[in-house]
Amino acid sequence: MKLKESFLIFLRGLFMGSADVVPGVSGGTIALITGIYERLIGSISFLVKFILLILKFKFKDLIKEFRKIDFGLFIPLGLGISIAVFFISGIINVLLDKYTGITFGFFFGLILGSSLYLYTHVDKLNYKRLIFSIIGFFFAYFIAGFSALQVNHSLFVIFISGVLAISAMILPGISGAFILLLLNQYQYLIDVLHDFRIKVIFVFFLGAISGLLIFSRVLDLLLRRFKFLTLSFLIGLMLGSLRIPWRNIVNSNSSLFLVILFGLVGFVLVYFLEKKFNEN
């Protein structure tokens, strides 16, 4: 049973890693619809406590806390994400280049289906939750409309890019890849990965770890204390982020029939993923 569970978490990692390299799609969305989002955020948040113990030299407490780290989640999930980022990213880039409208049509359906799925977990959408959804919608919508900044590829910029991208990646609806596009780092980092430039990869990874440890704790606190308001905000984020795939669909010359068809495939896939992963 543990082997099966680890394999299913590994598959989640593959899906999340594939989503994270696409501008406009968030790995956090995949984590939500496959049922591990709150477990993931809580586990990452716990790592902050563990690291603080190391920094405070409280080594007596480390062994006890070490056993609480969710290695059953982190190892297979991290392996799946890493494989997807390094190997599947090339395939996705080809699809985005040659079949732009169809590919983004698929992602449009995936995001829309995910937001509707998340809505079923909000209990009742009262006026407070509706306001948070509207705020989330406009926040993501305006970010999606920004133009790429003309910034350099210095190590400091790479570090900050890692902090911002990873924070976006764990938010459903906000794409870490799109944040990298806005910072003019997306294509540069794709090339860095394929050329295996260790120094740049290390600096980006350091920024990503820093952002992950800080932001995940805030998000974990919000999910525990204001769960439904936070979920309502996330629904708005996901709906607002639809501006990205929609813009790419409109600017492409793809067949409308195929765009709609693959949009429906993405929409139905949410139901399939939710059912298959959450029944285990």
Image (cartoon, rainbow, N blue to C red):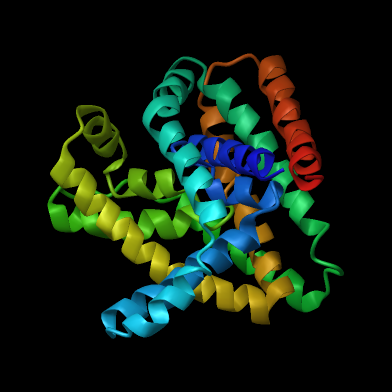
Whether residue 57 is visible: yes
**Which quarter shows the C terminus?**
top right
Q: Quadrant of residue 189?
A: top left
| Between 54 and 181, the one nearer to me in the picture | 54
Check the image and report above or below for 192 versus 203. Answer: above
User: Which percent across, then down, holds residue 190?
Assistant: 29, 33
- Give the residue drawn at x 27%, y 50%: 149
| Between 99 and 41, the one nearer to me in the picture | 41
User: Which percent across, then down, holds residue 260?
Assistant: 72, 24
User: Which percent across, then down, holds residue 83?
Assistant: 43, 33
- Give the residue drawn at x 50%, y 65%: 69
Check the image and report above or below for 22 versus 142. Answer: above
Check the image and report above or below for 107 versus 102. Answer: below
- Give the residue drawn at x 61%, y 68%: 135
- Give the residue drawn at x 51%, y 56%: 71
User: Which percent across, then down, holds residue 56?
Assistant: 29, 85
| Between 57 and 122, the one nearer to me in the picture | 57
Q: Quadrant of residue 181?
A: top left
**Which quarter shows the N terminus?**
top right
* Callout count: 0
Q: Is residue 135 left or right of residue 68?
A: right
| Between 200 and 252, the one nearer to me in the picture | 200
Whether residue 161 is visible: no
